Amino acid sequence: MIRIAAIAVLLFIAPFRMLATDAGQLYYALRTKVLQVKDYTADVRLKIDIDYMKIPDLSGKLYYKAPDKMKMVRKDGISILPKKNINLTLSSLIPAGNVTVIDVGTATLKGRKLRILKVIPEEDNTGIVLSKIWVDEAAMLAYRTETTTKDEGTVTLDLEYGKYVKHSLPDKIAITMDVKEYKLPKGVTMDYSEIPKTEDLKEKMKDNKNKKGVIEIAYLNYVVNKGISDAVFKEMK
């Protein structure tokens, strides 16, 4: 009787153990694919949508080098260096190191059935507390991430793919974040009179503390894994 009971318990828990293992394998496979991109340059168009700011659309060239170097140079030559809390790449929102992966199930997003993974870092070195990832298993692509960090609130990243899908690089992304956590990157604020002055900005942020801001980036082309010097990312004095 004891043997039968033990077998019954094993049969009951086995599917859940397999599900967790499969979820972990899916996550690590996705992360490995994403991290194959070591650097890229891309011509981009950027739109920042915040209710209390009128910011003209920007265009320029975006430089990225793994794991966390990024810089955008506008067409007028002014550099934009994103603040730490503006995560413009999928790789910056995927937890590194050892993680615990929980299979949350599936959901349909824009007509596409996706598997949802909840990822909890086991190491406290990235600032990420929790990340949810909506994954197309067949294509091995993430179409949405929702990442909660210690100091920077929650950031949602929606991705659309096209010509550069083999590199897991999107043609377009939309980043949604808490307005109270948002800081404009240097190079955006310096020459637009429509942007409130510092004290006015603080007051408006208080009034809009529960609202969301959205950054949309369209990638017009990429040059991938050709090597970029660290000197590119140094700020001009």
Image (cartoon, rainbow, N blue to C red):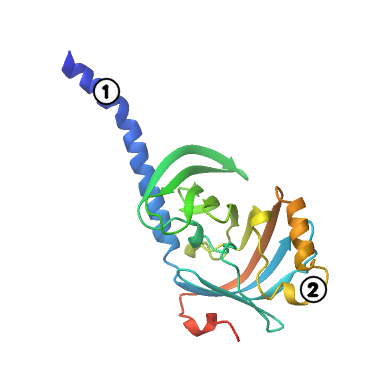
The quadrant of the picture occupied by the C terminus is bottom right
Residue 125 rendering spot, x and y as whole percentages: 41, 59
Element carrying mark 2? loop
Q: Amino acid at mark 2?
A: Tyr
Residue 97 makes an appearance in the image: yes
Residue 180 rendering spot, x and y as whole percentages: 67, 55
- Can you tell which quarter of the image residue 202 is in? bottom right
Residue 85 rendering spot, x and y as whole percentages: 58, 62
Residue positioned 17% across, 16% down in the render: 2
Q: Which residue is mark 2?
A: 192
Q: Furthest residue to the front?
A: 199
In the foreground, 96 or 47: 96
**Residue 73 vertical position relative to residue 116 in the rendered view, above or below:** below
- Can you tell which quarter of the image residue 110 is in? top right
Give the total of numbered labels.
Answer: 2
In the foreground, 206 or 124: 206
Q: Residues within 10 Å of mark 1 (few under 14, many from 20)?
A: few
* Cα separation between marks 2 and 1: 66 Å
Q: Mark 2 or mark 1: which comes first in sequence?
A: 1
Residue positioned 65% across, 71% down in the render: 44
Q: Furthest residue to the top?
A: 1
Q: Which residue is mark 1?
A: 9
Element carrying mark 1? helix
Q: Furthest residue to the bottom?
A: 237
Q: Amino acid at mark 1?
A: Val
Residue positioned 49% across, 43% down in the render: 116
**Residue 173 vertical position relative to residue 26 in the rendered view, above or below:** below
Kindly check if marks 2 and 1 are in contact, taking CB atoms under 8 A apart as contact.
no
Residue 50 makes an appearance in the image: no
Which circle, 2 or 1, is nearer the viewer?
2
